[in-house]
Structure formats: C-alpha cells, structure tokens
Amino acid sequence: MARRDAGIRFRDVYAHPVGRDAVDKILLQLGRSPRWVTNPLVANLRLRTLGTLAAPLIGPGVADAFAHILAEHPERIGQATGSDEQAKRSWWESAVFYQVYPRSFQDSDGDGIGDLRGIIDRLDYLHDLGVDCVWLSPIFDSPNEDMGYDVRDYRAVMTEMGTLADLDELIAGCHDRGMRIILDLVVNHTSAQHEWFQAAIADPDGPYGDYYHLRPGAPGEDGSGAPPNNWTSFFSGSAWRWIPEAERWALHLFAPEQMDLNWENPAVRAEVADIVRWWRARGIDGFRMDVINYISKRAGLPDGNEAIGRLMGFFGIENYFFGPRLHEYLHELRTAGFTGGGALDGLMVGETPGVGIEMGRLLSDPERAELDLVFNFDVLEMPGRIRWDDYSYDLRYLKTYYTQLLTRLGPGDHAALFFDNHDNPRMLSKVLGARADDPRLRTAVGKALATIQLMLRGVPFLFQGQEIGAIDQDFAGLDELRDVESRNRHAELRAAGHSDAEAFAQVLPGARDHARTPMRWEPGTHSGFTTGAPWQAGNENSIGFTVAEQMDEPDSVWSFTRDLIRLRREHRALAAGGIRFLAPRSRDCFAWVRTGGEGEDEWLIEVNLTDRQISRPRGMPKAEPVLASAADDSMLGPYGVLVSRCG
Ligand code: TEU
C-alpha cells in the first residue's frame, strides 16, 4: 500500500486546517515561531523527508500521523469571507454568558452543596450584573465521580441539586427576566452506572453492547494481558478498564467510571438527538457540548504514536481529538436535535480541547450547520507551559494570542472569550500569584481581564466569581482537594516515588479545585454560600472581595464589570461590531478600536498589560474617556484601562 505521505510537502500540511493547528500547537508547546515551518526550505520538504530528518528528535511515525489526519479531512483553510454587516445576527452573538458551577454557587437547604433553588434565589443578582445567558455545569442525575460530568440519567436532576420542577422554575425564571439558559451536555461518555452501560455489560453481545467501546481480552492473572491499545486517560493511567462480569475491556478517556459512547452506532446518535429534543421542548436554549470533538474515534482504535503521546502528555489523542466522522456526527445532531420548525435554532457551543483556530473555524462555519462556537484553550497557558506548571502568566501574551486569533477569524466566525472556568485555576492568580493579596493589584488585574474579555470582538463567557476578582485557594493538603483529576494525579505521583508533600506541591498549581470553591456572597461563615458544612473547602477570608462588599463599592471589580456589560448593551459596536488593532509595536499596551455600522459610535480601548505605569501609545484616535481604571489622559497605571468613545 502506497504510504499516505507520498508526495505530501510540508506546505500542504500547513495549508490544511488540522495540519496547521496541529503544527501551531506543537510550536506553541515548544515556544517557537511559525517561521520555523513557513520558510521555503522547510515548506518545500516532502513530509516523508521531514519525518526521516526529524525522527531522531521526535521519533518515527509522526509524519504518517499527519498524513493520516490530512487524508481523513479533505478540507482546506478557507479564506475569511463576508462582512460584519452580512454576518447573521443570532441572539448569542452579542450575548454575555455566565457559567454557574451549581455545586459551589448557592446552597438553599443547608446540605453544603449548591442547588437549583439557590440559583433561582440569585437570578436577580445575575440580571443586575447584566447577564444574558446562564450556562449550568451538569445538573443531571450522577454519582458525581467527576462532579456531574458522569451522567447516570439525562432526563433527571441530581437529587442533591433538586428536582425537574425546580429546573422548570429556573428556566422560567431566566426567561421571565429576559435571560436565556443553556445546559452542559456530556455525551462523549456516560457514567458506568447509566442503564445503557449496565445493560451492555450484562449482555455485551446484546443491543447495548455496541453503545460503548467494549473489546475482548483479559488482563491475565499476572496482569500480563495488555489492554486493546496504548491510549491513556486524562485522569491518569490506561484509558481501558477491565469489566470482569462482561469479560471485556471498556474505553474511558476520563475517569474509569466515565465510559466512552460509541458514536459509530446510529442508535447512540439517535439517543443523543432525542435527549437534545427533550430538553429543547422544556425550554432550554442550547448546550455547551462537553469534549464534543472527541466523539469520533478512528476505526480500529489504533495505538497512539509514541512521540505525539510524549509531546502531548496523552497517548492516542491523535486518533480522536478530531476524528474522521466528527463533522458528520455534529451536522446530524444539529439537524436532528435543533431543528425547531424548520429553522436551525438553539445554541451549540463546543468544548473542544486541542482544537486550534482553523479547526474551530471549520467546526463553527455557519454553512456547515455543526457547532456555533468553540472554546479554544490556547489562551489559558503561555507558550511552552501546561496547567500544572507553577509560573507567572504574562498578560502581554494575550495581545499576541488575541491579535492572531481575531485577525484570522472572518466576520462570519466567532470566538468564545474566557479566562476562567471550572477546569482551571483562576487567571487572576496565574498573573499575580501571591501578589493577589494586594487588593489594589487584585482589583486592577480583575478589571483589566474583564475589559479584555468584554471589549474584544467575541462572545464573553464569565465564570462565577470572576466578577468579584476571585483567586486561587491556599489548600492545606490533599484532603481538601475533591477533584478526581487532582486526586488521581497525586496518587500517580506518589506511586512514582514522590512524597505526599512533593506530590501535593506538583498538583496544587493546576488543580481544578481552585475554581470550585464556594461563591463568596458576603463576609462571614462560608461567605453566605451555605448554612451547613461546604462540600469543598473555601478558606479565603480577604476583606472586600465578596459580592456584598463589591456591589456597594463603585471602584470594585464587580461595579466595573457591570459597567462594561452595560456599555456593550447600549452600544452595538462593542457587542457585535468589528475590530481594528492599534499600536502593534507596543509590547506593554493592548489597544484596539471597536468599529460600528453607519452612524454608530466607534470605541477605543487601551489596556496596560504590565504592573508598571506606562504612557499611552502615541497616535491614538481622538476619543472621550467613558470608563477608566488607574488611568488618565496621558498615562496608564499598573494594569490600567481606558475605554473611550471616538470622535
Ligand atoms: O473537560 C475536558 C478536558 O479535557 C479538559 O478541558 C479538562 O481540563 C480536563 O482536566 C483534562 O485535562 C471536560 C469538562 O469540562 C471537565 O470538567 C470534565 O472532567 C471532562 O470534560 C470529562 O467530562
């Protein structure tokens, strides 16, 4: 069989959306410039030659892995087309989203776990902030091995969070206030306790056996029996679990209790479409689709390339992060699940780890009727860094990242703009570290991040607590960490010979637990989150950074965030206009203009990305300051911000 990479030159790889994003991702991890691969010498190299030359460095088979992906996806990088005015205007394009992590938002019954009634009690708060759409992290029935991302029943509410009637009341409460609500749909995998999986292992050759990735084999008494391939889980260890009662290996990309669904099975796809229709009929306005780019696995589930596995930290990822039938599955779900009365309606925002700019453009191209929007995670860590690294995030990287991202997106493309979520430490703490104890700096950085997120061209997704300058927690030890990923990583480090303290020190910087501490509503015991014992430690007691204190303080992060959202609401250019970057040569100042349509105001935004005072860039357009933080008409203080109306 002719090798797949016969004749392919490296420029072909870089002209391909998947190839370009994969190469850019590798360059990002290596902290290298794209010029490394766009120069004629490399660009004209045959992929096979490059693979041979690079083999000593990156190992064999990488070129073939690229060639395989290119062969599976015939698309080429499309040019940005259309204009801002032509781009369709759906409700979500100018909306401000707010992610609620229900478990830690507001407890109403004193069991220490946040619940739906608690969210209902806080809807006026979200409305006062200016939220347009609430995204709930999973509230479905779940054993909570992964805090709801292991669903046991897609049509029932987790007991500790309430009932379907509560959810109906919450949906109505949002709509009555002119807000919308989307749910977190986790359909790459189900809980091992889901009835489908239970039926599958009871009768692996029956109708449900093909709902999952089950493979024959056996671990062997002495453990000599190897799993079906070398894939590893994102939560440590192999991605395969031996199920004795079924005498089968079962695939789990995440925890051993999160069993990957087999989307090749039309019955699975029909089940998911039915779940979507069921929730749409209950008034849900759309979904955040959990790891939705993982649903298409390469036929045969082949071994992962050793070099790619070492580089990315997970073996097998090239066989599913953008699988061969992904477009087909998404389009089918979009049309089967979201077609209400003929028009494609509802929102599908994809959580797509590992997907880069070009793949994101492909998945969210309106012409394809797949996803509307994707999360690109490359903003969360600086080049060459991973979440577990303990380092100081330099905000100047945001200028590089967003200038590249928003320049590459066309008017018909949209970027989800976010810094925090339930899977990552707080961005404010990544920037300031222990200096976040300085309330002045903490406030300045909180406002600067809010300005970038709410004033750039894109769809902002605030995460609960961001609006009050929430920071990481000083967890005392492993017993305060609840997240399966944190605890598994700690166990893996201990098994590798690290002491408890060493293992904890390596887990702490990247622990998702930082983002899952209870919302700080007011000073005092458990910050008004619960009258009971909170499920997750939240030992911060800093003064001035609770909702109650911030709402009363005109110079707080909360007030500034509300004012930014209000400006977006009052001026279309800020919510849905175009963007023109300024002062490209300034490393320290991130400046841009939001452009409007005929007769609409244009806006100048300037952000000091450093902890030093800087002069405003020369040659800025004439503009009247409207909103400022640590800035005047000539200087920008540390992390200072100026939002001005042009003209
Ligand atoms: O996370 C998917 C994911 O791969 C990462 O974004 C996540 O940070 C994880 O730690 C892998 O390193 C989604 C959910 O957001 C996450 O909470 C779930 O644990 C995961 O999927 C499995 O459902």
Image (cartoon, rainbow, N blue to C red):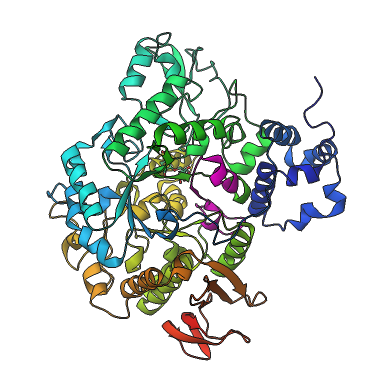
Judge whether residue 415 is colored magenta: no
- 347 left or right, relative to 239: left
Quadrant containing the N terminus in the rendered view:
top right
Left/right placement of residue 485 relative to residue 2 reads left
| Image quadrant assignment for residue 379 | bottom right
Q: Tell me the magenta residue range.
A: 360-389
Measuring 34% from the left and 60% from the top, which residue is drawn there? 474
Q: Quadrant of ligand 1?
A: top left
When asked about the image quadrant of residue 629, the answer is bottom left
From the viewer's perspective, is residue 57 above or below residue 602? above
Q: Which x, y percent locates residue 435?
A: 42, 73
User: Residue 392 vs residue 306: left or right?
Assistant: left
Residue 147 to residue 578: above or below: above
- Please state if 311 lies on the left or on the right of 639 as rendered: right
Q: Is residue 372 above or below residue 441?
A: above
Along the line of sight, the residue nearer the viewer: 99 or 539: 99
Q: Residue at x 53, y 91 (%)?
A: 634
Q: Position of residue 101 (x, y in %)?
A: 31, 50
Q: Position of residue 364 (x, y in %)?
A: 54, 46
Which residue is depicted at the point 75% across and 42% down? 13
Where residue 292 sits: x, y (%)? 48, 38
Q: Nearer the viewer, residue 534 or 352?
A: 352
Relative to 605, say whether 414 is above or below: above
Q: Does residue 257 appear anywhere in the picture?
A: no
